[in-house]
Amino acid sequence: MKYTQPWQGLKIDVNADISVIIPVYNGELYLKDAIDSVLSQTLPPQELILVDDGSDDATMSIANEYDDRIKYIRKEHSGIGHTMNVGIQCARCRHIAFLDADDLWVKEKLALQMKAFQSHQVDMVFGYMKQFISPDLSEREQSKIKIPSPVMPGYSAGTLLIKKDTFLSVGLFPTEFQFGIFIEWFSRAKDMELSSLMLPNVLTMRRIHRNNMTGSRHVDKSEYAKMIKSVLDRRRSQK
């Protein structure tokens, strides 16, 4: 997908008052790529927080390689919602953004979004997401993967930039679900009529790899059903 506007020469009159939060659990394979994609931003964030949800692989060793360039927080294993919330509560900057430990940002991600905040009166800024097959997969594994829509509007945590105060006005991520936590949070944001802008640029690269290439088989569908029921119950109670 071609960018609809160039990033080179963007003049941004605000500083990068951004905390980036990467939750990770046993993410040694792709974690370094994710961290590097944040640190190499054309508009680098002031703070990068890596929240380790009790990994038992080389995650801690990888984090230590970055010294004081990242803030590393290790906690007992308690799930994605609690892990993300720890990062949010520790964030010191005005804006917050999220990146999964196996995904990547394009270098202009934060610059384009901060420019959008400067130019538009909106509460949230999103962008497009592009899926890609991880190059470490074998040819046989790659041949089994079909990506019907490689580029799509990314209403997800990995494409979001938002002010921390705005995020907290909606509330933290739910901790009772392991899947669909952003869907549940975003449903609350929409019910509060928060405004959003979808940039026409690819901002986040979603990696397809061995652990998620058959996602529909591994996801506990009852978890999604539980999350959707929670959303519907909340909306009914508000009527």
Image (spheres, helix red, strand yellow):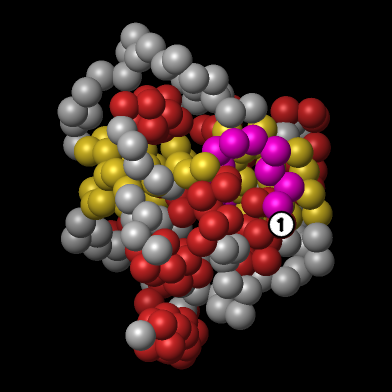
In the image, is residue 101 above or below residue 215?
Answer: above
- Dot 1, crowdedness within 10 Å: few (<14), some or many (≥20)? some
Left/right of residue 111 with respect to residue 81 in the rendered view? left
Left/right of residue 196 with respect to residue 89 in the rendered view? left
Pointer 1 residue: 86
Q: Residue at x 22, y 23 (%)?
A: 5
Left/right of residue 63 with respect to residue 38 in the rendered view? right
**Does residue 15 belong to the magenta stretch?**
no
In the image, is residue 167 above or below residue 118?
Answer: below
Res 184 → quadrant: bottom left
Q: Residue at x 45, y 58 (%)?
A: 209
Residue 170 visible (yes or no): yes
In the image, 122 versus 112, the foreground residue is 122
Task: Assign the N terminus to one quadrant of the image.
Answer: top left
Magenta region, residue range: 89-102
Q: Residue at x 37, y 55 (%)?
A: 194
Res 187 → quadrant: bottom left
| x and y percentages locating residue 28 in the rendered image | 66, 50
Q: Residue at x 72, y 28 (%)?
A: 69
**Does residue 96 belong to the magenta stretch?**
yes
| x and y percentages locating residue 40 in the rendered image | 53, 24
Q: What residue type is labelled 1?
A: Val
Task: Assign the C terminus to one quadrant of the image.
Answer: bottom left
**Local secondary structure at mark 1:** helix
In the image, 165 versus 229, the foreground residue is 165
Res 138 → quadrant: bottom left
